[in-house]
Image (cartoon, helix red, strand yellow):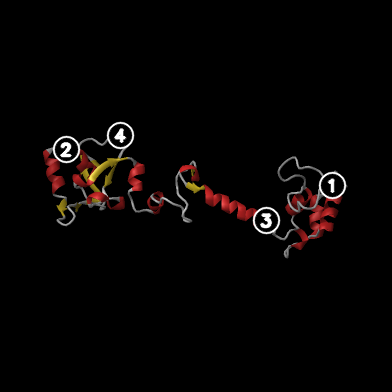
Amino acid sequence: MTPEQFAEFTKRYIPEPNTGCWLWIGMYGTGGYGRFRMNGKTYAAHRVSYEHFIGPIPEGLTIDHVLARGCGNTSCVNPDHLEAVTSATNTMRGSSPTAKNARKLTCFAGHPFGGYNLRVTSDGVRVCRVCKRLRRRKSEHYGKGRPRGERHKNSKLNDATVRAIRERRASGDRIVDIARELGLHRDTIGRVIHGIRWKHVPLAATTETPTATGGER
């Protein structure tokens, strides 16, 4: 930055005595960050300040307004309030839901996020193994006592009809014809025939096995 450019830069911020921030009063961009134009291009004002007063920004790093130094104002260009950090560190220091959750030491149930109990997914989501195991057990328990087949209040079939459907298919009847007669969707009939639905009713030895998604219609 030339002396003339620096003189223009200093005209575009005012010191705030309580926080020590240098508040940008020039052009603004997305997120409330100041913008400064020089050499025919527009730059983030806080990055210009950092590079002028401190030095080049290391490759791969971004500039954080350090809350621990009393600054959380994106319009501030005081170099004493700026620090070059990784994007992950910058996010962690923020106040977004992602940052708040990332700083938590326990899950919502109070289990510690650490050691064997912590699993991190490929997209960075932290998973509590204890909670996951408890949810799986609850799901399995619920499934065991859940009404199935003709005992379910919304069932349109019964065990005898299911056996008849499978026998008709085994004898050569088309799925679409069986579905039309029973007033059901052909996909429903297909799942019954192949044991995807009504699993508790044993498949006959002659029942066909699906060879492709959707099967014969």
- One can see residue 117 in this view: yes
Tell me which numbered mark, 2 or 1, is placed earlier along the sequence.
2
Q: Nearer the viewer, residue 175 or 117?
A: 117
Tell me which numbered mark, 1 or 4, is placed earlier along the sequence.
4
- Decide if residue 79 is on the left or right side of residue 190: left
Tell me which numbered mark, 3 or 4, is placed earlier along the sequence.
4
Q: Residue furthest right?
A: 171
Image location of residue 92, percent across then percent down: 35, 47
Q: Secondary structure at mark 4?
A: loop
Circle number at residue 143: 3
State the residue position of label 4: 59
State the residue position of label 1: 204
Q: Are marks 1 and 4 in contact (CB under 8 Å)?
A: no
In the rendered image of this protein, does residue 164 appear above or below residue 122? below
Dot 4: few (<14), some (14–19), or many (≥20) neighbours within 10 Å?
A: few
In the rendered image of this protein, does residue 51 appear above or below residue 148? above
Q: Secondary structure at mark 2?
A: loop
Q: Are marks 2 and 3 in contact (CB under 8 Å)?
A: no
Q: How many marks?
A: 4
- Decide if residue 136 is on the left or right side of residue 5: right
The residue under label 2 is which amino acid type? Met
The residue under label 1 is which amino acid type? Ala
